Image (cartoon, rainbow, N blue to C red):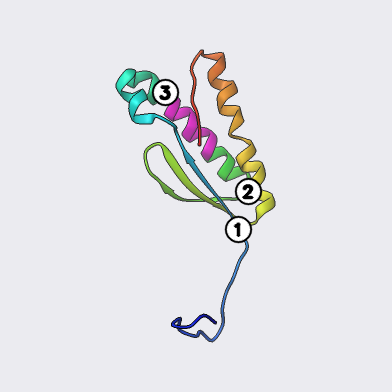
Amino acid sequence: MPEGLPETASETRKLAAIMFTDIVGFSRQMGANEARTLRLLEIHNRVIQQAVTVHHGHSIKSTGDGFLVEFPRPPCGRPGCNKLPAISGQQSAHHEQLSVL
């Protein structure tokens, strides 16, 4: 155990996948067209929540245009992240663009 850390009777460790999303240029987009940006944010939030539910994840924190999500194990995290390209496809149909980091 590293120096300076208290010893515990039993350590619990788990393997997890962590996903963070952020909408690139969100503040700028809000300034340019608030109504459009809020529509895109709704789509973003819906896609993230669906991925979290389908892949048994847990939304740790949401900060306006970003999410911090934990999936129970890496194989679940990867398919959840693969759902994100669907955002671009949905918006292309509406001639709107959203970049997710």
The answer to which quarter of the image holds residue 92 is: top right
Q: Can residue 27 be found in the magenta stretch?
A: no
**Closer-to-camera residue (63/55):** 63
- Residue position marked by numbered label 3 in the rendering: 39
Q: Quadrant of residue 84?
A: top right
Q: Which mark is residue 16?
A: 1
Q: CA distance from mark 3 to mark 2?
A: 26 Å
**Dot 2: what SS?**
helix
The disc placed on residue 86 is none
Along the viewing direction, whichever of 25 and 90 lies nearer the viewer: 25
User: How far is disc 2 from disc 1 in space, using C-alphas?
Assistant: 8 Å
Residue drawn at the location 62% of the way across and 35% of the way down: 83
Residue at point 36%, 23% (across, down):
29
Q: Is residue 47 above or below residue 14?
A: above
Q: Nearer the viewer, mark 1 or mark 3?
A: 1
Question: SS of the residue at dot 1?
Answer: loop
From this view, report whether residue 7 is shown above or below residue 32: below
- Quadrant housing residue 85: top right
The numbered mark, 3 or 2, whose residue comes first in the sequence reads: 3
Kind of residue at badge 1:
Ala
Q: Residue shown at 51%/80% (left/top)? A: 2
| Magenta span | 40-48
Determine the residue located farthest toward the right in the rendered image. 75
Residue at image mark 2: 77
Q: CA distance from mark 1 to mark 3?
A: 31 Å
In the image, 32 versus 35, the foreground residue is 32
In percent of width and height, residue 18 lies at 55, 52
